[in-house]
């Protein structure tokens, strides 16, 4: 069953610096993660529920299954990417694994 | 530019009742929304960030652009689906629009 790592970045204090880091460093690291099937990224525009504009970006990384995801983040490329995530993610950012329904 | 409506459902008090409503009523309503390109749904398993298990499900609805999304939710099918969302979404659920990067 396909799984995806869903990352929700909260609003950065400096969006330009965030974008530079994200597109210039972070996503290139992500693309080197072994077993990664595909990536989907998006800029969050409007909170339709009328709630707070909590999140700035959503990033999803797809893997064949849970084992592939675990192997990916056990790899050196995965560890480097995870370390860079700690640098880029504003406080309150969330990251979770979802099993994609058929 | 493709846009997606991202819905994050918080943990329901009765997951079985939620799933019955979600798969039996809500997603069939969603599938009737005009202009909907595709849907991706997933069950959230693990909060990898060590934070709270805030969310139970993630649902994404894809549209060709912002205008198509607005037209979709102005339609009677969209309004019916939005009303059903109010019934099914546990408190604290989030809904936002994201512009998908190329």
Image (tube, coloured by chain):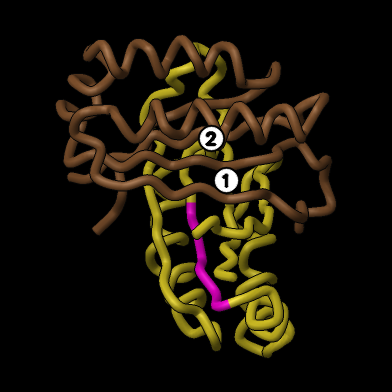
Chain colours: A brown, B yellow
Q: Is residue B3 above or below residue B15?
A: below
* In the image: residue A47, left or right of residue B69: right
Q: Residue at x 68, y 49 (%)?
A: A44
Q: Position of residue A46 (x, y in %)?
A: 77, 55
Magenta span: B59-64
State the image coordinates of residue B8 (x, y, percent, origin top left).
Answer: 57, 45
Q: Which residue is mark 1?
A: B8
Q: Secondary structure at mark 1?
A: strand
For residue B95, the mark is none
| Discs 1, 2: same chain | yes
Which residue was labeled with disc 2? Answer: B55
Magenta span: helix, strand or loop, mainly?
Answer: strand
**Crowd class of label 1 (few under 14; some 14 to 19; many from 20; radius 10 Å):** many
Residue B58 location (% of width, % of height): 48, 47
Label 2 lies in what chain? B
The answer to whether marks 1 and 2 mark residues whose Cβ atoms lie closer than 8 Å is: yes
Q: Does the magenta segment cover residue B63?
A: yes
């Amino acid at each position: 069953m396909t799984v995806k790592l869903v990352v929700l970045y909260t609003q950065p204090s400096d969006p330009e610096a965030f974008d530079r880091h994200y597109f210039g460093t972070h996503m290139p690291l992500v693309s080197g993660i072994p077993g990664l099937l595909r990536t989907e990224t998006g800029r969050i525009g409007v909170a339709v529920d009328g709630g707070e504009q909590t999140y700035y970006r959503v990033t999803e990384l797809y893997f064949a299954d849970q084992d592939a995801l675990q192997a990916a983040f056990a790899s050196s490329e995965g560890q480097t990417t995870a370390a860079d995530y700690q640098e880029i993610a504003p406080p309150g950012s969330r990251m979770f694994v979802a099993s994609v329904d058929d």
